[in-house]
Image (tube, rainbow, N blue to C red):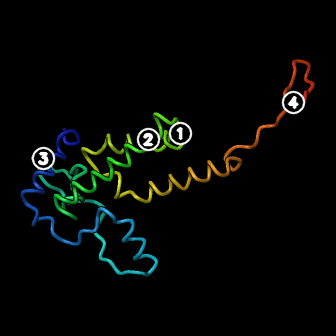
Amino acid sequence: MVYLLGGVVAFDNVVKNTELYAGPRLTTFRFIFAFLDRIGLANYDLPKFIPVYTYTPAPTNVYTIYFSYFLDYGYMGIFILLFIIGFFSSTIFISAYFKRSKNGIFLYGMVISALLISNVNEAFFIPLSYWLQAVIFLFFVCKFPTLIRPPVEDTKQTNEGVKIEKA
């Protein structure tokens, strides 16, 4: 039950007691800040990736998709970031369903999985590295398909084992 309904109750505790969750709040776009920090372009005090526990009455650190958006940017951040997610999710759906794009189908599978766990976790902006790696992988698969699978020969083989060249 903690994972099914605990996130909503825990997020309610966050909204009612925001001061308990004070500290460096760069969680939503943590990948970008960590990358800039790592290459030396900035110096950020990055928060832990694991949120603090709250009681629902059972202890949990599952807060829904809204948790990092709310603490980092407030209610307006929730609205804007969910609008962005909705826009890109819809664009990917149109690409997958109506245009039958292989890339769209691949990315839509990722979108659906992120949406399914949104009641317990944020899976769009926090794991931005995961999404970028998927897009890079798709780029290489589409542009250089022979890296993944060898090219198919343009010949047919008959029952007697003699190859016949296509005309």
Mark pair 2, 3: CA separation: 29 Å
Dot 3 falls on a residue whose secondary structure is: helix
Mark pair 1, 4: CA separation: 29 Å
Dot 4 falls on a residue whose secondary structure is: loop
Callout 1 touching callout 4 (CB < 8 Å):
no
The crowd level at tag 1 (other Cα within 10 Å; few <14, some 14-19, many 20+) is some
Task: Give the vertical position of 80 relative to 37 (above or below).
Answer: above
- First in sequence, mark 2 or 3: give its number: 3
Amino acid, disc 4: Lys
> Which of pointers 1 and 2 indicates the residue nearer the eye?
1
- Give the residue displayed 62% in from the left and 48% down from the top: 142
Q: Which residue is mark 1?
A: 101
Mark pair 4, 2: CA separation: 38 Å
Amino acid, disc 1: Ser
Amino acid, disc 2: Tyr
Judge left or right: residue 94 versus residue 23.
right
Q: In the displayed orientation, state which residue is furthest to the left.
A: 16
The crowd level at tag 3 (other Cα within 10 Å; few <14, some 14-19, many 20+) is some
Q: Quick one: quadrant of the N terminus?
A: top left
Q: Which residue is mark 4?
A: 166
Q: Which residue is mark 2?
A: 108
Location of residue 161 in the rendering, given as x and y in whole percent from the top left corner: 90, 23
Callout 2 touching callout 3 (CB < 8 Å):
no
> Which of pointers 1 and 3 indicates the residue nearer the eye?
1
Query: What's the mark number on residue 9?
Result: 3
Dot 2 falls on a residue whose secondary structure is: helix
The crowd level at tag 2 (other Cα within 10 Å; few <14, some 14-19, many 20+) is many
Instruction: Please state which of residues 44 and 132 is positioned toward the viewer in this rendering.
Output: 132
